Image (tube, grey):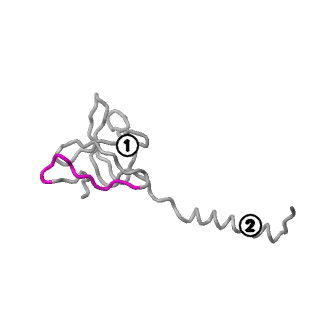
């Protein structure tokens, strides 16, 4: 089946327009949790508490290098509240991040996200 030059240019223009649209709209940030959090290293010989900021779904312990997010997808982590209580949580996925978690042990209730 033969195509005219006009049909070729029309298809090429449509394809370039689609590519341009994709490049002009950056992907939204992907993270399991947003904010400033204290995260606990699951390595039994380490148990370091690191501070993570911004959006993250990956963090290696600053002391031993162990990945603190576990599971598949990697969205399970132990966060530590301002009062030192550990809370094992399942964060949001990469498309719906966790921005708040209320400590189960604090009275009065305290948010584990240090920005809140």
At a point 59% along the width and 66% down the height, the residue shown is 21
Q: How crowded is the residue under tag 2: few (<14 C-alpha within 10 Å), some, or many (20+)?
A: few
Q: Is residue 13 left or right of residue 64?
A: right
At a point 27% along the width and 46% down the height, the residue shown is 38
Q: Earlier in the sequence, mark 2 or mark 1?
A: 2
**Residue 115 spot, x, y in % from top left:** 26, 57
Give the distance between the C-alpha atoms of the residues marked 2 and 1, in whole angstroms: 45 Å
Labels 2 & 1 near each other (Cβ < 8 A): no
Residue extent of the magenta highlight: 96-108
Quadrant for residue 75, please give it. top left
Q: Quadrant of the N terminus?
A: bottom right
Q: Secondary structure at mark 1?
A: loop
Camera-side residue of 29 and 105: 105
Does the magenta run of residues contain 37?
Answer: no
User: How many numbered badges does the structure rendering display?
Assistant: 2
Q: Which residue is mark 1?
A: 59
Quadrant for residue 95, please give it. bottom left
The answer to whether 53 is drawn above or below residue 11 in the figure is: above
At a point 32% along the width and 42% down the height, the residue shown is 77
Does the magenta run of residues contain 100?
Answer: yes
Q: How crowded is the residue under tag 1: few (<14 C-alpha within 10 Å), some, or many (20+)?
A: some
Main structural element of the magenta stretch: helix, strand or loop? loop
**Residue 88 spot, x, y in % from top left:** 28, 42
- Tell which tag, 2 or 1, sits nearer the viewer: 2
Q: Secondary structure at mark 2?
A: helix
Residue located farthest toward the top when viewing the structure as drawn:
45
**Residue 19 spot, x, y in % from top left:** 63, 62
Residue 11 got which mark?
2
Residue located farthest toward the left when viewing the structure as drawn:
107
Residue located farthest toward the bottom when viewing the structure as drawn:
6
């Amino acid at each position: 089946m033969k195509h005219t030059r006009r049909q070729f240019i029309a298809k090429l223009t449509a394809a370039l327009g689609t590519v341009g649209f994709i490049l002009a709209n950056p992907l939204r940030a992907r993270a399991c949790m947003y904010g400033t959090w204290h995260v606990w290293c699951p390595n039994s010989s380490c148990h370091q508490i690191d501070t993570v900021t911004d959006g993250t779904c990956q963090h290696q312990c600053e002391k031993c290098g162990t990945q603190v997010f576990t599971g598949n997808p990697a969205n399970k982590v132990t966060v530590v509240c301002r009062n030192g209580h550990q809370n094992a949580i399942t964060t949001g996925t990469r498309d719906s991040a966790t921005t708040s978690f209320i400590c189960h042990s604090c009275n009065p209730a305290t948010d584990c996200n240090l920005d809140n």
